[in-house]
Image (tube, rainbow, N blue to C red):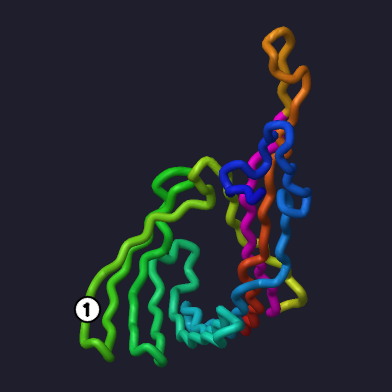
Amino acid sequence: MASSSSDLGHARPEGDELASLDELYNINVVPSELFFKFRKQIEGFRVGANLEFFNLSANEFHAKLVLKPTAAERRWKFIYEPLHGDIRLLSKKIPLTKYLNLQVGIGHNFQLNATGWKWKLSTCLGGDGVSQIRNKTSIGLCPGVDLRIGWRAEYILPEIHGAVGTGEPMFNMNYGRLQASIDRVEAIITQG
C-alpha cells in the first residue's frame, strides 16, 4: 500500500504495511549546489567572485561579482551577474524577531531594460506541521580557506502513547520521520 507523506511515521491500522526505517529516516549527503567563492579585501571593502553550480544534471551555472563593506555593521551588498545582465543592491538580512528576517533590494536587468525592487522574509524554521531546521556550518580548513556547508533537516519527533480500558492499544508508537540533506557546499578562498 502506498503511503502519503502525511501518514509517514504514524502507526497504521492492523493489516497495513508499516513504512520501513529507510523510508522514515533518510539522509542525503550529495549536495545539490556547489559554490566556489574567491574574496579579496581592498580598503574597507570585500570584493568577491562567485562561481555557482546547481542542478548538476542540467549543468546550470551562475557567475556573480559581489562588493560589500567589511565593517561589522555592514548594511548592504552590491551584486553583478554578467551572464544575466543583472545588478542588485541588497540590504543585509534585518532581524524582525529571533527567527524571522527581512531583506530588501533594488535591481536592474540590462537584457530586459527593467528596474524593480524585491523583498524576502526568511526563517531558519519550517511549517506545514513538519518541523524544519536550515543552517550553515563553517569549517576553517587553513588560513584563508573555509568550507561552508548548508544543510536542512525536516523532522517529526517520535511519539509513544497508549491507553487502558478504551479499546485502544495499551502501547503504541509513531516512529516519527527525518529527511535530512546537505543542500550546498561552498569553498571560500579569502585573501587579506
The image position of residue 190, as x and y in percent, is 62, 81
Q: Nearer the viewer, residue 9 or 74?
A: 9
Describe the element under mark 1 as helix, strand or loop. strand
Q: Is residue 48 left or right of residue 8?
A: left
Magenta span of residues: 144-159
- Residue at the front extreme, as displayed: 15
Does residue 77 lie above or below 53 as drawn? Answer: above
- Residue at the top extreme, as displayed: 165
The image position of residue 58, as x and y in percent, is 55, 85
In the image, what residue occupies the spot 27% across and 81% down?
A: 108
Q: Nearer the viewer, residue 78 or 169?
A: 169
Q: Pointer 1: what residue?
A: 115
Q: Main secondary structure of the magenta part?
A: strand
> Is residue 3 shown in magenta?
no
Residue 46 in sight here: yes
Name the amino acid, label 1.
Answer: Thr
The image position of residue 143, as x and y in percent, is 73, 77
